[in-house]
Image (cartoon, grey):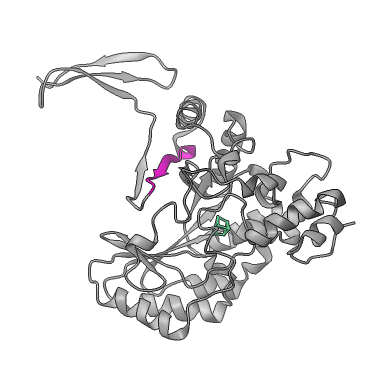
Amino acid sequence: MRAARQTLRRPDDLIAAGLVAAERRAAIEAVAARYALAVTADVAELIDPADSQDPIARQFVPEPAELDASPQEMTDPIGDDAHSPVEGIVHRYPDRVLLKPVHVCAVYCRFCFRRETVGQGRALSRAQLTAALDYIRTHGEIWEVILSGGDPLVLAPRRLAQIVEALAAIEHVKVIRVHTRIPVVEPARITPALVRALRARGKATYVVLHVNHARELTANARAACARLVDAGIPMLSQSVLLRGINDDATVLGELMRTLVECRIKPYYLHHGDLAPGTAHFRTGIEQGQDLMRALRGRLSGLCQPTYVLDIPGGHGKSPIGPGYLTHIGGGHGTARYQVEDFNGRTHAYPPRP
Ligand code: SF4
C-alpha cells in the first residue's frame, strides 16, 4: 500500500509503500545510515514495484552496492572544495560561479556527485550568504551565477526571491542559472509565486532540469516546465548516463525528443562521476560515445546534448566526443581532413586553396 502524498524518508517508509521487500530492511537501513534518502510521492507513484530493474526505482531506492566504494572513487569527485574561496561559492571558471544556498534536495539520487555533502540539512547561514554575495559583488569578472546545491528550488519563494533580487542588483551579473530536479520530482512546487521569484529584473534567468528518463516527464512535470517556459524562462536539461537506466539509444533518444517537445533544449549528458559507491551506475566512455553517435544518426540536431566529463580533481568539464573530424595531412593552413557523416561514412575535406 502506498503512503499518500508524503515524501518517503526511511527504509520502513519504502517497505510500507511496497518499494522494498521487508526482508531487505537491514541492508537498506545500512545504506540509509550512510547516505541521505528521500523519495517524493510523485516519484514513488512512478515506480513499478513488480519490475526489479525499474529505471525510476534504480535512481532513488537505495541498493547495498552503494556501500562498495572503489579505490578510484572520491568524496569530492568534481573538486568543489579546491575552488571554494568562501562557504557556498565554487569559482572554477573565470566568468561564472556556483552559489549553493542549500544542501538539501527533494529526492536523493543514488548516484549523486555531491552525496557526501547533500542531505545533511545544512543551508548557508545569513552571514555566510552575505559573504557569498559580497564575493560575487567584488569580482567583476563574474557574468553568470549558477544556483545549485542541493536543489535551490526547495527554498520558499520569498527566500528564493531575496537571493535572485540580490544577484540581479549586481551590475556585472547578467545571467542567473538554476539547476534543479524539482519540476520532475515535485512539480506542484512550481507555483506562480516560485516562477515570479525566479524572474530576475533586467537579467536573464535560465532553468536547467536534471532528468534521466522520459518516464520522469509526466503530465504534471510537463505542466510545471510549461509554467516556467511560458513565463519567459528558457529551459535546458542535464542528464547523467546511467547503466541499466538510460544507456540505450532508444531510451536516450526518447528522453531527448520528449525534452524538446516540452521546449527544453538538451544541454549536457554527463558521464558518471567517481562518487563513492556508484560504480554500478557507470558506463564506459566508449559506450557513451557510441550512444552519442547513435543519437546523431537518428535525431534532430535540437535533440543533441553535449557528452561531458567533469575531470576528477576539479579541473572542470570537457566535452568527450565522439569526434567527427580526423586530420589526415598537411600543416596549419594547408591541413586536409576526413569528416564522418551521420551514417558513419567518411568524406575527404580539401585544404584551403
Ligand atoms: S538532485 Fe542533484 S544534488 Fe540532489 S541528490 Fe540528485 S544529483 Fe544530488
In this view, which residue lies farthest toward the bottom? 127
Q: Is residue 34 above or below residue 266?
A: below
Task: Give ligand 1's quarter of the image.
Answer: bottom right
Which residue is pictured at 31% across the width and 73% down the height?
136
Q: Which residues are magenta?
A: 302-312
Residue 173 visible in rendering: yes
- Give the residue drawn at x 39%, y 56%: 79
Question: Toward the viewer: 114 or 70?
Answer: 70
- Residue at the outermost right position: 1
Vertical position of residue 142 compared to residue 301: above or below = below
Residue 37 x/y as whole percent: 68, 60
Q: Quadrant of the C terminus?
A: top left
Q: Position of residue 96 (x, y in %)?
A: 32, 62
- Give the residue displayed 23% in from the left and 71% down from the top: 140
Q: Residue at x 66, y 58 (%)?
A: 185
Quadrant that contains the N terminus: bottom right
In the picture, measured across the screen, residue 14 lies left or right of residue 128, that is right
Say which of 5 and 60 sits in front.
Answer: 60
Quarter of the image where one finds residue 14: bottom right
Q: Is residue 107 visible?
A: no
Compared across the picture, whether 318 is left or right of 29 comes to left
Image position of 328 with respect to 237: above or below:
above
Say left or right for 267 vs 18: left
Place of residue 129 in the rendered image (x, y in percent of width and height, measured from the top left): 42, 80
Does residue 14 appear left or right of residue 298 in this picture?
right
The picture places residue 230, in percent across and down from the top left corner, at 54, 61
Q: How many numbered dots are placed on residues in this image?
A: 0
Whether residue 306 is in magenta: the answer is yes
Relative height, residue 145 to residue 312 (above, below): below
